Structure formats: C-alpha cells, structure tokens
Image (cartoon, helix red, strand yellow):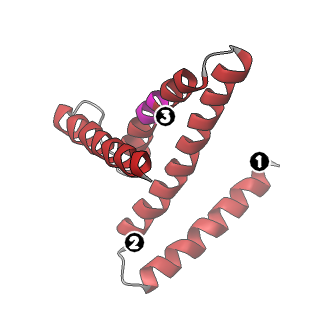
Amino acid sequence: MKQKVAIIYKFSFGLIEKILVQFGLSRTASNQMISFGIVGVLVAFVYFAISLFLSSVLAWEPWKASTAGYFLAIITQYFLQTLFTFKRPLNQPRQAVRFFFTVLTGLVFSTILTGYF
C-alpha cells in the first residue's frame, strides 16, 4: 500500500511540476508551489481534526475549539512551510515575525469581510 501511494505521489508531483514549468516557472518555484499546496491541505486537516476532537470528544464550546484548532494549525503551518516548502532553519526570528504578521493580517481581513457580509 505504501509503495502504491509513493508511486501515485511521485507521478502526480511530476505531472503538476511539468505543467507549471510549461507556464514558465522554474523547477524550484514549481516545487515550492506544489509543496505549499500540500502543506495547506495538511494544515486544513489539522485544523478540522483538532476542532472536531475538542468540540465533540472533550465537549468544548465550538468557538473555543475552533480558536484552539486555528492557533495549533498556524503553528503546524509555520513548521511545515519553513522546513518542507522553503527548506529554511527554524531559528530565524525575523522570518517567524513576518509569517505571524502575515497570518494575523489575513485573520483581520477575513474577520472584517465575514463580519459585514
């Protein structure tokens, strides 16, 4: 089973990479784009799983479970994007500040937009 998943992953990754290179992206940029998407899907799953576990199993109030899931997902995203997507060391404070500022800015805009519509 593991071998089949590895083959499918390698084929899919290679196919998407070829398409992105055809659009003029470098191999490095296309690999980062694919890795970014993979991490995004994993982080969405982390958020969902943690929120569901906290609200269903531990009977937390939904807003508390969602908030905890969100912050744990952000931390997971930082680690995975830094190590897997961009292959950088974690001990760069400036990078961490920029990442969390970007996430906070997105949260503010999302809150404003969803609060008014």
Q: Position of residue 58 (x, y in %)?
A: 68, 13
User: Badges 3 and 1: C-beta atoms under 8 Å apart?
Assistant: no
Position of the C terminus by quadrant: bottom left
Q: Which mark is residue 73?
A: 3
Q: Secondary structure at mark 1?
A: helix
Q: Residue at x 70, y 55 (%)?
A: 6
117 over 72 or under it: above or below = below
N-terminal-most mark, 3 or 1: 1
Give the amino acid type for the residue marked by disc 1 in the picture: Lys
107 over 33 or under it: above or below = above
Quadrant of res 16: bottom right
Q: Residue at x 51, y 79 (%)?
A: 18
Quadrant of res 71: top left
User: Which residue, given by chain and number where applicable, does mark 1 sit on?
Assistant: 2
Q: Nearer the viewer, mark 3 or mark 1?
A: 3
Q: Secondary structure at mark 3?
A: helix
Q: Residues within 10 Å of mark 2 (few under 14, many from 20)?
A: few
Q: Which mark is residue 27?
A: 2
Farthest residue to the right: give it.
Answer: 1
Q: CA distance from mark 2 to mark 1?
A: 26 Å
The one of 80 and 48 positioned closer to us in this rendering:
48
Q: Main secondary structure of the magenta part?
A: helix
Stretch of the chain drawn in magenta: 71-76
Asked whether residue 112 is drawn in magenta, I would say no
Q: CA distance from mark 3 to mark 1?
A: 26 Å
Q: Residue at x 63, y 63 (%)?
A: 10
Q: Secondary structure at mark 2?
A: helix
